[in-house]
Amino acid sequence: MNTPAATRFRQFASDNYAGICPEAWEATERANYGHSPGYGDDAWTAKAADLLRDLFEVDCEVFFVFNGTAANSLSLASLCQSYHSIVCHELAHVETDECGAPEFFSNGSKILLVPGEEGRIPASGVARVVQKRSDIHYPKPRVLSITQATELGTVYSVNHLQELWEVARRFDLRVHMDGARFANAAAALDVAPKEITWKVGVDVLCFGGTKNGMAIGEAVVFFKRELAHEFAYRCKQSGQLASKMRFLAAPWVGMLESGAWLRNARHANECAAKLEAKLADIPGIRFLSRRQANSVFIDLPPHVLVALRGRGWKFYTFIGDSGARFMCSWDTTDADLDAFAQDLREVFALPPDTAAVAAASHGPRPR
Ligand SMILES: *Cc1c(COP(=O)(O)O)cnc(C)c1O
C-alpha cells in the first residue's frame, strides 16, 4: 500500500487533521447496503434526525450539510433580511474564516463585532453594539451569534448563556450558535445538551460532526421550527443538498447511538488538559487562555515556532504574532502528547539564535 507519510503520525494543528472514528465508519459501512432513496428521503436521514431530537429532548427541525461554513452562513441567512446585522465576537469563525459567506448568503447582512476576554462575548458588549445607534442608517441588529466552544478553546457557562439570552430578548435578537465544537463544550460543562441550547434561548445550532470524528458533515438544528421555513431550498440552491444523503446522515446515527459523540469530545478535552499539565512546568511558558475544551494556546517566541516546525510539528498561529494553538482530537494518544511535550521542552530551552535552532530542527521524526 502506498500510504502518504503524513498520515502515519498525529498532529496538534487541528481536530480536522484526524481521521474517521470507528463508530462513524461502521455506520457508513452499514449504510452502504443495497439502494436507498436520494436527497434525504431515506431511513438513515430520518433516524439521524430522530436521534438528534432525542439528544436535545425537543421536537426540533434538522438538516444535514457538508460543512460548517454552509451550516453557519445558511442558517444565519434564514434569520436575517439583507438590511439586518449579526452581532458576534471579533474572533468568530463567521467573521474571520468564512470568506464572507454569511454576508453573501444573506444578501449583505452586516456583521458587527464585539471584543471579549478569552473569546467570549460579554452581555454588556452586545448591548453596547446594539445601542450604539437606533436610526434607520444603521444595519438593524437581528442575530446574536455565539461560538460554543469558542475559537480560543474556552466555553460559555450556562449562566453566561442566560445573560446573553436576556440581552437578546431585550433587543429582540435571534440566537445562533456556531457549535463546530459543541460536543467539546457539552463534555467540558458536563451538562445535557438542552441546558446550553434551547433552554437558554438558542434558536438554531450548527452542530459539528467533522471535528468530532466524522469525515464530513454538520447538522443544522432549528429549535424554533418556523425559522427553518424554506431552509431546504437554501441548502439546494447553495449546493448543500447531498444526493446520497444517507452517507451524511449515517455517521450521525453511529455517533449518537454509541455515545461516541460525547466520548470523543471528552477524550480530546482530557488530552488537552494532560498536554497543558505536561507543559506547565517549562520555565517561562505562558498559556494564552484558560484551557476548557480541546485546545491549548501558548505564547511562543519566533525561534521556538521555527524549531518546532523544523521538527515536523504543524500548528496554527492566528493569535497575534506568537500565539500558537495546539489541538487534541478523538484519536490523540499519550504517546503523541509525550513526543510533543518532549520536543517543546527541548526547543524552549534553546538560545534564540538561528544556528542553534537550525541544528536542533533535525527534520520530521518518524512517529
Ligand atoms: C471548523 C469550524 C467551523 C466549520 O468550518 P468548515 O471548514 O466550513 O467546516 C465553524 N466554526 C468554527 C468555530 C470552527 O472551528
Image (cartoon, helix red, strand yellow):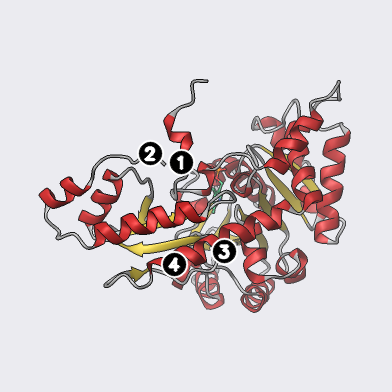
Q: Which residue is mark 3?
A: 270
Q: Is residue 199 above or below residue 311?
A: below
Q: Which residue is mark 2?
A: 366
- Residue at 29 percent across and 50 percent down: it is 308
Kind of residue at disc 2: Pro
Q: Nearer the viewer, mark 2 or mark 1?
A: 2
Q: Is residue 20 above or below residue 336?
A: above
Q: Which residue is mark 4?
A: 276
Numbered circle sitting on residue 9? 1
Q: Do residues under tags 2 and 1 come within 8 Å of each other at their CB atoms?
A: yes
Task: Kindly report the distance in space between the C-alpha atoms of the residues bearing marks 3 and 2.
Answer: 25 Å
Which class describes the residues within 10 Å of circle 4: few (<14), some (14-19), or many (20+)? many
Mark 4, secondary structure of its residue: helix
- Residue at 86 percent across and 21 percent down: it is 34
Task: Kindly report the distance in space between the C-alpha atoms of the residues bearing marks 1 and 4.
Answer: 20 Å
* First-in-chain label (3 vs 1): 1
Q: Position of residue 49 (x, y in %)?
A: 83, 46
Mark 2, secondary structure of its residue: loop
- Residue at 70 percent across and 53 percent down: it is 261
